[in-house]
């Protein structure tokens, strides 16, 4: 890849070219080793630390590309087994599309329950998969058929279920046990389960009563190392004939607890604020932050508009406090004239469900740092 074709080397989208992907060498090597030794992995971290990016990065590595068929399925938006099954079937089909006719013929022979959705273009002979979620009438059967298909593949497969904890909230309560049963029977397929809701996913894999108990190796994705990220960022600046003071990176790293997405967003903006031949120093931080928050304005307005008055009030109080331990303490309730412990508790539940508030070590804080800054400024 010619890096100079990319106008800003700090990529914040889903797919990052290898050259613009920072580090994660050790994590990638560990993942490869786990998979090569037939061990499934559960990859856990707070949101925006880089799990999804790491999985895509892993799938691009030579030892993986050469030997495995890889499938990535993000089930964050799924709330039923039927939806998950749809996303899974679609991912497998998309991956097959480029392959020879014979492959997708086998696909539709194995996945009988979806046969009616399979169409061949009368002119080109190209396959297409014209089915909506509704076409999956028996998700359990379809799911089983997809797994059998992968099991029969001529290469081993890797299936990554991103945001896997969602299955715990599916309408079909038996999903967990059912999936575990199917996965347990797979010998040609390895699995990566990733999750941002750390509490939920840990419970799934670490509590004895749950079907997935100890069925995968835990990997907690840590923030990138600050020095390594600083090297990465300064090098990219210099490739474009710009310079970057290291104390800028250190400051950003501290402000956002080293969380990858915020680092990349800030560096992306700082890069664009620095003309060729000039140096990015600490004075640019404030402008960069403001610009990012302004760009997100619409998103934040929408987010806020979906909250109840009580949720807004609680959110505002948490913004003022920064991090808070007990939201039901009398002092906190009094200070912000909230409605009383039980009402605060139910408002909190809603904010956590909407992923606006997260808990770390039983302390609450606003999940999105930029959103917190926006709230402070505008609300
Ligand atoms: N190693 C990395 N180098 C550069 N950017 C990265 C790296 N890992 C993740 N990112 C970027 O950080 C952001 C958050 O990463 P993502 O993988 O979506 O996090 P998660 O899946 O943990 O929520 C994405 O915009 C991604 O492009
Ligand atoms: Mg992700």
Image (cartoon, helix red, strand yellow):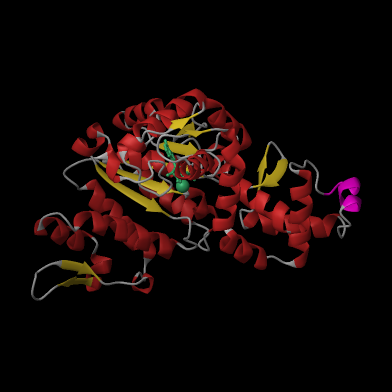
In the rendered image, residue 11, in percent from the top left (x then y), is placed at 40, 44
In the rendered image, residue 25, in percent from the top left (x then y), is placed at 37, 27
Asked if the stretch drawn in magenta spans residue 232, the answer is: no
Instruction: Answer with left or right where residue 42 lies relative to residue 336.
Output: left
Instruction: Answer with left or right where residue 266 lies relative to residue 155.
Output: right
Instruction: Answer with left or right where residue 73 lies relative to residue 221.
Output: left
Residue extending farthest to the bottom is: 122
Is residue 191 visible to the viewer in this orientation of the structure? Answer: no
Residue in the picture at 50% in, 57% down: 174
Residue in the picture at 22% in, 38% down: 65
Quadrant for the N terminus in the image: top left
Residue in the picture at 72% in, 39% down: 362
Answer with the quarter of the image where residue 4 lies: top left
In the rendered image, residue 271, in percent from the top left (x then y), is placed at 45, 41
Q: Main secondary structure of the magenta part?
A: helix
Instruction: Report the front residue among 200 and 301.
Output: 301
Q: Is residue 350 above or below residue 119?
A: above
Instruction: Report the front residue among 279 and 189.
Output: 279
* Residue range highlighted in magenta: 328-335
Is residue 28 visible to the viewer in this orientation of the structure? Answer: yes
Quadrant for the C terminus in the image: bottom right
């Amino acid at each position: 890849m010619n890096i100079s074709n990319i106008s800003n080397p700090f990529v914040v989208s889903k797919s990052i070219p290898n050259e613009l992907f920072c580090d994660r060498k050790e994590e990638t090597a560990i993942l490869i080793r786990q998979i090569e030794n037939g061990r499934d992995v559960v990859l856990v971290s707070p949101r925006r630390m880089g799990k999804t990016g790491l999985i895509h990065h892993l799938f691009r590595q030579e030892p993986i590309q050469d030997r495995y068929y890889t499938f990535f399925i993000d089930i964050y938006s799924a709330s039923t087994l039927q939806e998950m099954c749809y996303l899974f079937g679609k991912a497998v089909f998309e991956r097959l599309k480029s392959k020879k006719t014979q492959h997708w013929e086998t696909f539709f022979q194995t996945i009988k329950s979806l046969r009616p959705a399979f169409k061949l273009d009368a002119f080109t002979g190209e396959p297409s998969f014209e089915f909506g979620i509704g076409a999956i009438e028996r998700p359990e059967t379809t799911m089983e058929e997809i797994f059998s298909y992968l099991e029969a593949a001529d290469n081993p497969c890797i299936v990554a279920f991103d945001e896997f904890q969602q299955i715990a909230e599916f309408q079909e309560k038996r999903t967990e046990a059912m999936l575990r049963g199917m996965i347990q029977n797979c010998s040609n397929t390895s699995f990566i389960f990733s999750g941002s809701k750390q509490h939920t996913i840990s419970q799934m894999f670490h509590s004895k009563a749950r079907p997935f108990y100890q069925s995968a190796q835990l990997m907690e994705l840590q923030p990138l190392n600050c020095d390594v990220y600083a090297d990465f960022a300064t090098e990219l600046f210099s490739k474009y004939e710009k310079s970057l003071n290291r104390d800028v990176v250190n400051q950003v790293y501290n402000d956002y607890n080293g969380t990858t997405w915020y680092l990349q967003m800030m560096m992306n903006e700082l890069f664009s604020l620095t003309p060729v031949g000039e140096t990015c120093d600490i004075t640019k931080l404030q402008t960069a932050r403001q610009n990012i928050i302004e760009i997100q304005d619409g998103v934040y307005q929408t987010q806020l508009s979906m909250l109840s008055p009580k949720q807004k009030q609680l959110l505002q109080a948490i913004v003022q406090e920064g991090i808070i331990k007990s939201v039901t303490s009398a002092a906190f309730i009094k200070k912000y004239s909230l409605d009383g412990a039980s009402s605060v508790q139910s408002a909190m539940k809603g904010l956590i469900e909407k992923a606006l508030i997260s808990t770390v070590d039983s302390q609450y804080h606003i999940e999105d740092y930029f959103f917190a800054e926006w709230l402070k400024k505008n609300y």
